[in-house]
Image: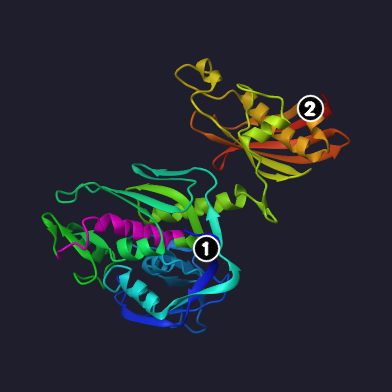
Amino acid sequence: MKSDVWQRTLAKPVALTGIGLHTGLETTLTFCPAPADTGYILVRKDIPGEPRISPRPELVSQTTRGTTIQENGVKIHTIEHALAALAGLEVDNCLVELTASEPPIMDGSAQPYVQAILKTGIVEIPGSKRQVFRLPKPVILQNGSKEIVGWPYPGLRITYNLYYDHPWLQPQRVDVELSPEVFEKQVAHCRTFCLEQEIDWLKSNGLAKGGSLENALVIGEQGPLNPPLRTEQELGMHKILDFIGDLALFGSAVQGHFVAHYTGHEMNARLVQQLKKIKERNGIMERGKEKMIIDAKEIETLLPHRYPMLLVDRVIDLEIGKRVVGIKNVTMNEQFFQGHFPGHPIMPGVLIIEAMAQCGGVLLMKSFPDARDKVVYFMGIDNVKFRKPVVPGDQLRLEIEVDKLRSKIAKMHGKAFVGEDLVCEADLMSVIMDR
């Protein structure tokens, strides 16, 4: 996925008509051009006032066999295939007009949408740079055996592990490095599916009113009731299609490698919520064209600490004289785990405080001119609270804010997080002096 191109939209409107998978209602969906920075907006043309909804994870109201969003009482069901077509083809801005509450399911895949979009054409919007969120750190979501793991990656790569306790369905692992070409040729044509034994349950719960062998694969004990498969990996690839559509709830393109184990729409929506929190609280902030990042080598020029006492791996955000955000990756190789405690490793609280103090030291060293000839001494600590243990495999995020900075003495408040969990906080006092 390229991040140095202009935003894109459609050359002109294009419409498709069909029935909704779950509502069974006939619907016309029209993809329309939209200006830069619009994103995706869904429009209910069948409701007075034509309410508009911008898909966001906090609007997800239902994830049973599809992603439903709701705002101010207005619902739109099963949005993932249409959004996947737009996101997979790197269309950044589009109005999606609907004449009912659910996009048409068409043949159960995103291929009809893709064909319509390519036929009408995709155009760049010069002067509007494409917005891309690059995952800055690992993220993990778990719910029993279901799991999504993501980590930084120069593009969008999705790996899906499919497993059903079913005599015909064998475990399947699929992997794609996403681009518009890959999406069109490998992903878009893969259809939605269900097990034959699930049909009665779907009907009794008011779902699949528009479902048929024409728009969904139905898997019986001996295989599909409507063969053949379009590809041997069709089921796993459709899960990736759904993932792409749900990821579009983020509001802009995302870069990272995501590995999903047996997950669906509910976990996908939770992932997007987590990504938005990371962007808001952890994201690498840019000021002008400079990324405020300090790597391990530069940290060693600012602090006198060395292995095994250097407890800041990098700085991901810095506002000189005001705040700093640093990272400490906690591994089983840390020397202190040999004795704290054998068989039950926990990072000593005093070292969490030390890591916060060192992060504050980086902030002070960057806040004073000619700081290379200076050294920061830790003077005092107060109001310490340890809230949760830190164990091997955790990533500490150290957030330090300056309360007062007078002459060469600083009073700061430090917080240490693992994910979104606050594990420690304290008031710190430090002084910068000549070496």
Q: Which mark is residue 251?
A: 1
Circle nearer the viewer, 1 or 2: 2
* SS state under label 1: loop
Q: Position of residue 22 (x, y in %)?
A: 30, 70
Q: Residue at x 44, y 71 (%)?
A: 75
Q: Position of residue 341 (x, y in %)?
A: 51, 18
Residue type at tag 2: Val
Does the magenta segment cover residue 227?
Answer: yes
Asked where in the image residue 330 lies, by quadrant, the reply is top right
Quick one: which residue is furthest to the left in this view?
Answer: 222
| Vertical order, 29 against 228 (above or below) | below
Residue drawn at (51%, 16%) of the image: 338
Q: Where is mark 2, residue-wise?
A: 375
| Among the 4 quarters of the image, the one containing residue 121 | bottom left
Q: Is residue 425 visible?
A: no
Name the residue located 68 percent from the left edge and 30 percent from the top edge: 300
Between residue 99 and residue 223, name the one nearer to us: 223
Instruction: Residue 127: say if magenta.
Output: no
Dot 2: element: strand
Please name whichever residue, 223 or 8, is drawn nearer the observer in this view of the structure.
8
User: Which residue: 83% across, 35% down?
Assistant: 370
The reply to whether residue 318 is visible in this rendering is yes
- In percent of width and height, residue 175 lies at 33, 51
Residue 372 in the image, given as x and y percentages of width and height: 78, 32
- Disc 1: CA contacts within 10 A as few (<14), some (14-19) or many (>=20): many
